[in-house]
Image: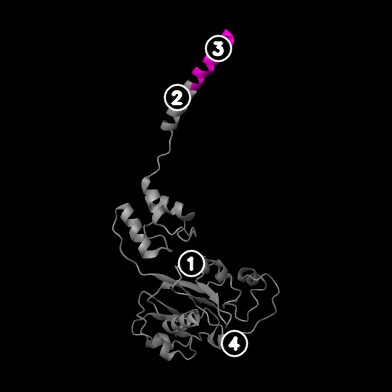
Amino acid sequence: MGLLLGAAITLVILGMVFGIGLAIASDKFAVKVDPRIDSINEVLPGANCGACGQPGCSGFAQAVVEGKAPVAGCTVGQADVARLVANVMGVKFENRERVISVVMCHARGVKDKFVYHGIKDCRAANIVAGGFLGCDYGCLGLGTCVEACKFEAMYMGEDNLPKVIEERCTGCGRCAAVCPRKIISILPESKMVHVRCKSLDKGAVAKKICQDSCIACKQCEKICPYDAIHVQNNLAVIDYNKCTSCGKCIEVCPNHTIINFARERSLTRHILTI
């Protein structure tokens, strides 16, 4: 009996010693969590899309606190969320213009080079002989960008090209990232003039392939009063830091390659309300 009692007392004493030791170790080696991380997490949209370059919203919150990410790094939340994050960090936030996705391709009248029976994915189709589309630079129309959008901000139009629903677009860039032909750009919403072509073929060749292709005529370059558009590698390219969306280049484009995005935006809104 005495032996059992002694063993029990010994176990109790050992338990107390180990308990105190664990408590001391827990306090000494505890990882201190900055409360600002939780505060930032609470104001983030919770999309966990990774567009900020961090592993989800929690990773972004930690990166901001550690000075490894800017307060305006959440592309989904954009200015509203950036302002809240800045308040948590106690810094001043300078408002930046909202950005949206823009599909830089019309691809009208383009014929297929061959019949594709593979996986319905633009990346997979692009691997097979450089893609089935007659234009080596145009949209393949399999909707990979639409599938990648977490915000239901894109849909495939009747012309078999992806359309952006501006009101839902967060400018996260997921659609642009999955496009194998890099025809989707993330641009400020105030920029209304776009060259809807990515072909680097010479004008005569491009014209035979697509009705709306850039033929590198340089008419746009000559008329632009702001030196904002230049033909590079057979393709007109706009410098959006200089472009004022005046539309003069649209007027002289013989192939209607340069468009006013405001008109397409209105058309998209009209279709969605029908």
**Label disc, if present, on residue 158 of the rendered structure:** none
Residue wearing tag 1: 173
Which numbered tag is attached to residue 5?
3
Compared with residue 27, is residue 63 higher up or lower down, i.e. above or below? below
Q: Is there a contact, CB below 8 Å, between mark 2 and mark 1? A: no
Magenta span dominant secondary structure: helix
Instruction: Determine the residue positioned at 54% across, 75% down.
Output: 155
The kind of residue tagged 4 is Gly
Residue at image mark 4 = 109
> What is the secondary structure assignment of the residue under circle 3?
helix
> Which amino acid type corresponds to the residue marked 3 in the rendered image?
Leu
In this view, the mark in front (2 or 4):
2
Q: Which residues are magenta?
A: 1-15
What is the spatial separation of the Cα atoms under label 3 and label 2, in whole angstroms? 23 Å
Q: Quadrant of residue 80?
A: bottom left
222 or 56: nearer the viewer: 56
Give left or right: position of 74 versus 215.
Answer: left
Check disc 2 and report the residue beneath it.
20
First in sequence, mark 2 or 4: give its number: 2
Give the percent coordinates (x, y) of residue 96: 34, 67
User: Local crowd at mark 3 within 10 Å, few (<14), some, or many (≥20)?
Assistant: few
Q: Quadrant of residue 160?
A: bottom right
Q: Position of residue 43 (x, y in %)?
A: 39, 56
Q: Earlier in the sequence, mark 3 or mark 2?
A: 3
